[in-house]
Amino acid sequence: MVVLTKENFSIRQICESGQCFRLEKLEGQEEVYGLTAFGRHLVIRQKDNEISFDCPADEYENLWKGYFDLEEDYEAIIRSIDEKDIYLQKAAAFGNGIRILKQDLWEMIISFIVSQQNNIKRIRKCIDLLCRRYGEKKETADGSIFFDFPTPKALSGASLEELYACNLGYRSRYVRETAICVLNGGVDLDAVRVMGYKEAKTELMKLCGVGIKVAECVCLFALHKTEAFPVDTHINKVMKEQYPEGFPFQRYRGYEGTLQQYIFYYDLTGGREIEKNYH
DNA sequence: CATCAGGCGAGAC
DNA sequence: GTCTCGCCTGAT
């Protein structure tokens, strides 16, 4: 068990921000979450600023500390926001516990292919079915069962019909073709891992079902290219309503993606009411 | 009943 | 290069 005190960390906000579809609130308890990632299952508890990770110290150091981006100073990011940009100030204050996770590349590719023209609840269900049916069955130290994310090989073995049965709909073909492409080495994920942002984005877009938006999400949530700025229906709406003269990308160069998450989360869960932004 | 969910590919031009 | 259209499926 590892316990630490941290500002700008909310496991609830991270969960609700929809960047990880295998982090979920556990039934019956407040602020207790379960995460499956990198072949492990982790229980996380939070009370105010005190967070506990139910794992050995070395696992925390080698895996979760990086995964949750705990070395980054999010307070400094929020402080850097233009004080006259009321909307962005409110969005960041609202989601100030969000972190940009460093997730598995393959898992993010499939997850965000599945996410297109889909809602978070259904995305979670799809991913869960894929893991149960094609992922390796594993067991935690205390004996509970979980399923790892399926490998490219395992997914390429699924027929279109079987993928439809996982509720993927028309995305079934994209998942199947992407799995086959990665398995063949048509796109080399080890190479993508060491590429810069633009190069990685271009390479990812060679995959079937990966367009600009999905590629940006993968760059941001797997490769930690925080300059990636995924534009979806929410961001598009906010850009029109709040930034008719354009979003000030130059001011926030290098961490636009982090701000994107504040905006996305605010629009998704909090900032429903339309407010004017005064520059 | 229509519209929408963290879009994308294919085809027309 | 830009524009339009159809697409699985469940919720509202």
Image (cartoon, coloured by chain):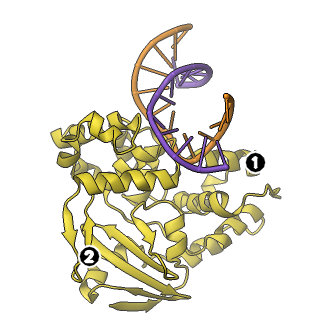
Chain colours: A yellow, B orange, C purple
Q: Distance between the residues labelled 1 and 2?
A: 47 Å
Q: Which of A6 and A117 is in front in this view?
A: A117
Residue drawn at the location 51% of the way across and 54% of the way down = A120
The numbered mark, 1 or 2, whose residue comes first in the sequence reads: 2
Q: Which of A226 and A49 is in front in this view?
A: A49
Locate residue A4, reporting x and y percent.
43, 91
Looking at the rendered structure, the kind of residue marked 1 is Glu
Residue A26 located left or right of residue A276: left
Residue A87 located left or right of residue A102: right
Residue A152 located left or right of residue A71: left
Residue drawn at the location 43% of the way across and 78% of the way down = A70
Q: Nearer the viewer, residue A120 or A266?
A: A120
Above or below: residue A18 compared with residue A189: below
Locate residue A175, reporting x and y percent.
32, 40
**Given the image, what chain letter belongs to the residue carrying mark 2?**
A
**Given the image, what chain letter belongs to the residue carrying mark 1?**
A
Helix, strand, or loop for circle 2?
A: loop
Looking at the rendered structure, the kind of residue marked 2 is Ser
Q: Residues within 10 Å of mark 1 (few under 14, many from 20)?
A: some
Quarter of the image with the N terminus of chain A is bottom left
Residue named by callout 2? A144
Residue named by callout 1? A241
